Image (cartoon, rainbow, N blue to C red):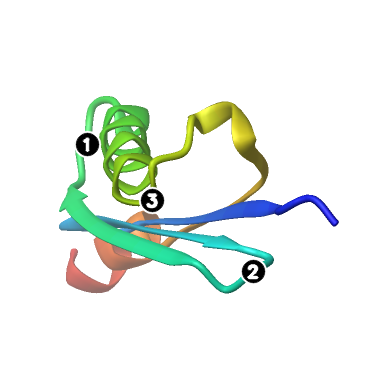
């Protein structure tokens, strides 16, 4: 069976967290500063980091799960 890769991303008020996992149990994670004007920049930086950790190309990722607490944190902290 082919290895399946999934990426989880959470954009927070200060940090963007990324976790990469394979169906075979391989995992990698990183935390990068959130880029407010362009949050996708933090995702791309983190994506490159976790892919490098496990030596795979980003096109091997078959699923991306995205969440954010960015707006919630802004409301809570005013």
How many other residues sit within 10 Å of disc 3, few (<14), some (14-19) or many (≥20)?
Answer: some
User: Neighbour class for label 2 at 10 Å: few (<14), some, many (≥20)?
Assistant: few
Q: Which residue is mark 3?
A: 54
Q: Along the line of sight, which residue is nearer the eye, 4 or 47? A: 4
Quick one: label 1 or label 2, which is nearer the N terminus?
2
At 27% across and 73% down in the image, what residue appears? 76
Q: Is residue 34 above or below residue 20?
A: above
* Left or right: residue 28 compared with residue 26: left
Secondary structure at numbered mark 2: loop
Please identify the quadrant where the C terminus is shown.
bottom left
As drawn, which residue projects farthest toward the right? Answer: 1
Residue position marked by numbered label 1 in the rendering: 36
Q: Position of residue 70 (x, y in %)?
A: 34, 56
Q: CA–CA distance between discs 1 and 2?
A: 34 Å
The residue singled out by tag 2 in the image is 24
Q: Residue at x 32, y 34 (%)?
A: 48
Q: Position of residue 25 (x, y in %)?
A: 57, 73
Q: CA distance from mark 3 to mark 2?
A: 12 Å
């Amino acid at each position: 069976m082919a290895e399946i890769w999934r990426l989880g991303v959470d954009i927070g008020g200060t940090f963007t967290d990324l976790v990469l996992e394979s169906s075979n149990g391989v995992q990698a994670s990183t935390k990068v500063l959130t880029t407010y004007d362009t949050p996708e920049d933090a995702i791309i930086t983190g994506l490159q980091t976790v892919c490098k950790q496990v030596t795979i190309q980003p096109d091997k990722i078959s699923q991306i799960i995205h969440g954010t607490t960015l707006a919630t944190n802004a409301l809570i902290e005013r």
